[in-house]
Image (spheres, helix red, strand yellow):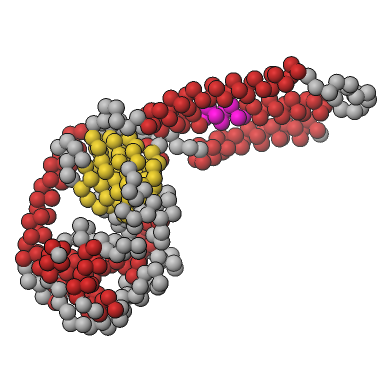
Amino acid sequence: MALIRKLKAFIAVLVLLPATSLLAVEYNMRKGATEVSHLAYDLHMMAVYVVFAIGVVTFGVMFYSMWAHRRSANPEPAKFSHSTVVEIIWTAIPLIILILLAIPATKTLLLMEDTETDADMTVLVTGSQWKWHYKYLDGEQKDIEFFSHLTTSRDLIEDYDGQAEKDKGDIYLLDVDNPLVIPTGKKVRILLTSDDVIHSWWVPDFAVKKDAIPGFINEAWTRVDEPGVFRGQCTELCGKDHGFMPIVVEVKAQSEFASWVEGQQQAKVEAEKAAMADSSKVWTMDELMKLGMDVYNARCAACHKADGTGMPPVFPAMIASPMVTGPVSDHIGIVVHGKAGTAMQAFGAQLTDAEIAAVVTYERNAWGNNTGDLVQPADVAASKSN
């Protein structure tokens, strides 16, 4: 009977081994898509194997000692108290193991920190609450810049009753309007900083995780050889919407990247022309209110709520606010320049004059404020020049 029980146990282990292997793959560190990520993965696995071997040897010696030196087999206890040879061995072996692990680890760390050697392009990444700004600093793509926001609507995110769960998909918190785009086979140097609080730019497939600190420049780099889309997140507790600050990097073949750069340059010219046309246009109240509502819901509602009630005291209400119902120039100024020491950002560089005029008009006439004030883009331009 004992033999049958042992045979059943052995068969059960054989049956469970494939499932265990799958679990190990699912929860293990990902191998990634870059040379650095592969080296980091190899170091991780080497350490796991070493720790496993140490565990097997240590527990093997321990169980053998308990069996071989049990009282029934050795009624007379040993008289020695220590062994110099054994102490030298168990000191030397861990030291050798640490040295053997330290050599490849040091090489990998030095490679990770070598941001300048043979860099093909440089991108400035700036974190702010709660978005990323990307600016290309050299090459044909120089001066291309844009903000990257989470695209999933607040209504879909805050779907507490689960009615829209089927519409979310698996990446609803990891999807953005403007991903960072880089070419294959090129070393991309990444400079990281922040406009407000500490953020952290993390793309696990690149083995890149660096803090973005206000007033300080951190550096990282990556080189991806195959096209693809890679996702990450801000991993620093940077405020209320920390969980809604994803990172998406799209790696394109070099020919496709060149086409993307050309498209971005053309789009920039067209956007500047459109912004100039909008700035010179005299807008009606209905036009401003419609555009203002769209801008408010996309950029302001996360803090001040769609109904204008805010989240006092950190994010004040828009309803009957002294700022919103006070002088128009003050209202424009705080939207354009922000407010130091608070989460209120400067939107002067993020929105066009027409968008700022629209959102200020909307805030001054929505939720029962009804000031009747109508702000034109020219008023915003005048505020910027002051």
Image-based side of 69 in relation to 50, left or right: right
Residue 50 colored in magenta in the image? yes
Residue 116: % across, % down = 29, 30
Quarter the N terminus occupies: top right
Give the magenta part as a residue range.
45-52
User: Would you say residue 158 is visible in this rendering?
Assistant: yes
Tell me the chief SS of the magenta region. Answer: helix
* Residue 379 vs residue 352, the one in the foreground: 379
- Quadrant of res 297: bottom left
- Relative horizontal placement of residue 65, taking residue 315 as reference (left or right): right
The quadrant holding residue 349 is bottom left
Residue 384, image x and y in percent? 15, 63
Q: Is residue 199 above or below residue 329?
A: above
Residue drawn at (34%, 75%) of the image: 317
In the image, 253: left or right of 344? left
328 inside magenta stretch: no
Residue drawn where x is 41% and y is 61% of the image: 240
Q: Is any part of residue 295 visible from this angle?
A: no
Q: Residue furthest top?
A: 85
Q: Which of these two is toward me, 165 or 289?
A: 289
Question: Of 130 and 149, which appears nearest the observer?
Answer: 130
Q: Identify whether 134 is placed above or below 15.
A: below
Q: Residue at x 26, y 76 (%)?
A: 324
The quadrant the C terminus occupies is bottom left
The single residue placed furthest to the front in the displayed view is 386
At x 22%, y 58%, the residue is 350
User: Relative to 50, is 122 above or below?
Assistant: below
Residue 164 image position (x, y, % from top left):
38, 64
